[in-house]
Amino acid sequence: MKKKKCIICSEEFDGPGHNADPIDTGRCCAICNSQVVSPMRVKIFIEQFESSYKERRWYDKFLNDEDKER
Ligand SMILES: [Zn+2]
């Protein structure tokens, strides 16, 4: 089987590898996938969750303020 080069650590690996997104565009090895790519995906997911939560809080506050004026 032809070896592929990891886009993150430049080590060669067997098999199809893993999608390196969002770290880089290309394929990475299993080690980088578990050590770098997966934690980054979790981090981005948490940041998106927190920002959407904050927007919701702001929206709820906006609605509550409007209720007081009535
Ligand atoms: Zn790697």
Image (spheres, grey):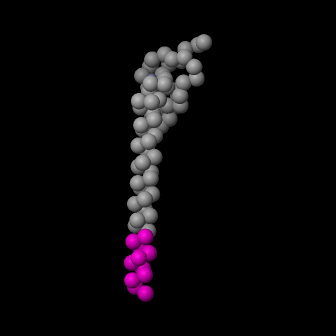
- Image coordinates for residue 66, horizontal then vertical, percent: 42, 80
Q: Is residue 17 above or below residue 55?
A: above
Image-quadrant location for residue 38: top left
Q: Nearer the viewer, residue 50 or 6?
A: 50
In x, y percent, where is residue 46?
42, 48
- Position of 3 relative to 66 (above/below): above
Residue that lies at the very extreme toward the bottom in this rendered image:
70
Name the residue furthest top: 1
Q: Residue at horizontal 45%, vertical 46%?
A: 45
Residue under the image location 49 percent in, 23 percent down:
29
Total residue callouts = 0
Name the image quarter holding the C terminus.
bottom left
Residue shown at the point (44%, 53%) measured from the top left: 49
Q: Quadrant of the N terminus?
A: top right
Give above or below for 53 relative to 17. Answer: below
Q: For this rendering, which residue is in front, 26 or 19? A: 19
Magenta segment range? 60-70
Measuring 44% from the left and 27% from the top, which residue is drawn there? 32
Q: Is 47 a magenta residue?
A: no
- Reply yes or no: does residue 61 show up in magenta: yes
Most common SS among magenta residues: helix
Residue 61: % across, % down: 39, 71
Residue 47 in the image: x percent, y percent?
Answer: 41, 49
Ligand 1 lies in which image quarter?
top left
Q: Is residue 61 left or right of residue 1?
A: left
In front here: 35 or 7?
A: 35
**Furthest residue to the right?**
1
